[in-house]
Structure formats: C-alpha cells, structure tokens
Image (cartoon, rainbow, N blue to C red):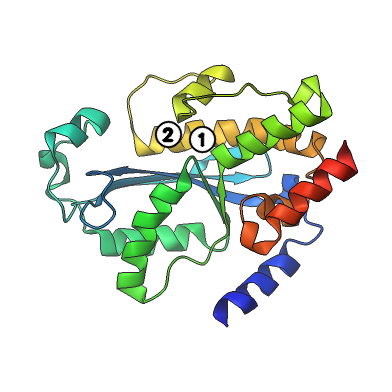
Amino acid sequence: MMNIFKNYYESNRYKDMPLTEGRYVVVDTELTGLDEKKDSIVSIGAVRMTGGRIDLSDTFHKLINPETALTAESIIIHGIMPSEVIAEPCIDSVLMEFSQFCGTDVIVGHFVSIDMSFINREMKRITGLPMQNPVLDTFTIYEWIRKRGAIGNKSDVALPLMRDPKLYKIARYFEIPFNGGHDAAIDSFITAQIFQRFIPMLIESGIQDMEYLLMLDDPFRGGDRFRAAAEMSHF
C-alpha cells in the first residue's frame, strides 16, 4: 500500500517537470566486497545536480569504519587502508547524514543497484525502511539512448555498443578525464559528468520530462509501455 501512494506521489510530483529543472544526487560507494550479505560500505561520495549543472559546492563524502574487515583484494581497488577508517564513524550515523543530504532528490549512479542494495540493507536495519528516493542508473540510460539512436538513425544521439560498459570506459568515450583510481567522491563526479552529457541526448530522443525519465528505469511503473510508445512516437 505504501508503494502505491509513493508511486502516485512521485508521478504527480514529476509530471511536466523538465529534465533541466530536476534535482539529482549522484552517488558512488566503495565496498569491502560485493557480497551483499556479508560485505560493508567503506565510503560514500555524492554530488548534487540541478538539471545539467553540477554543484561542486554541494557534495557529500564520508569514510566509514566498516563492520566487515578490509581485505587485500578490496584495498587494491579503492586504496583505503584499515588505519584510515579505524577512527571513522559507523555506517548508522553516516547513512542518516546521507539520507538528509539526499532529501527527496532523485538518486543517480552507475550500476546503482549495487550501491543501493548495500545502502538499503543498512537503512532497513536502522529505520525499518529503504530509501524512498527515485533511482536512475546511468548504464540503463546509456543503453536506452544507444538503442533509440540506432532505431531512429540519429547520429547526434548515437552511442556505441559497449561489451564492457564500466564507468571509466564510458567516461573515456565522452573524453571525461580520470586518473583510474577508485574513489567514491571522484567517481560520483565522473558519473555526474556522464549524466550531464545524457540530458541533452535524452531531450533530443524525446525524453523531456522527469516523469518519463523515471519510467525508463522502472518497468514496474510503465517503462516497457513507454519504450514501445517512444519507438512509435519519436521515430
């Protein structure tokens, strides 16, 4: 029942709201591993966007003393040493701050289901509920634009098929600079720049309102119907 009211509220809140007026929080996490049941978040980074404008004065970055011990394998990826997090706060207080930072903004991330599965596991433990924000995945958006561009033969929105669609590979395609090291704050900024590139491409592809953008990433709220409608209406 709660989801019904939440979906109704969101659909009305974002109805006729242009993408250029949407408020987004672009997020990335660093983890002790990818096992959702036993691994933990060790860092959260986020940056706010309004439309296509990235606000570097409005960011969030916290190290966390994880419940799961850091392993050599995870340290190689993100470079966070046990000595750096021993005095840092636990996940509970950090997630409360993060939730306040996000407010009601749309959360954006690359393969964001990974980040949100860890965040929501802890949020449900702490508050009894997952985060209620709408969520967008930049890879899903990339694929949607790529397929629509191919169908419509629109060179200005054409994107290549990527067999290894990692964040840095897409960043390289858009000539977004990066140093190759995993860092939640930096990666959230890279993701924000990718999403920034997508906004005019989405508008060119016929997605001009927030209501329809959110449908792209949620088949349970009409995403499949919208895909079919988009192919017929815009091409």
Q: Could you tell me which quadrant the N terminus lies in?
A: bottom right
Q: Which mark is residue 191?
A: 1
Above or below, 19 against 89 in this view is above
Question: 25 and 121: which one is in front?
Answer: 121
Number of numbered callouts drawn: 2
Q: Residue at x 47, y 46 (%)?
A: 112
Q: Residue at x 43, y 62 (%)?
A: 99
* Residue contact between numbered discs 1 and 2, judged by CB atoms under 8 Å: yes
Secondary structure beneath disc 1? helix
Q: Is residue 98 left or right of residue 149?
A: left
Q: Is residue 80 left or right of residue 143?
A: left
**Residue 134, quarter of picture:** bottom right
Amino acid under disc 2: Asp
Q: Is residue 48 left or right of residue 221?
A: left
Instruction: Report x, y in % for residue 199.
Output: 70, 37
**Residue 79, quarter of picture:** top left
> CA–CA distance between discs 1 and 2?
6 Å
Amino acid under disc 1: Thr
Q: Residues within 10 Å of mark 2 (few under 14, many from 20)?
A: many
Q: Residues within 10 Å of mark 1 (few under 14, many from 20)?
A: many
Q: Residue furthest bottom?
A: 1
Instruction: Report x, y in % for residue 66.
Output: 19, 52
Instruction: Report x, y in % for residue 235.
Output: 88, 35
Secondary structure beneath disc 2? helix
Above or below, 167 against 43 in this view is above
Q: Which mark is residue 187?
A: 2
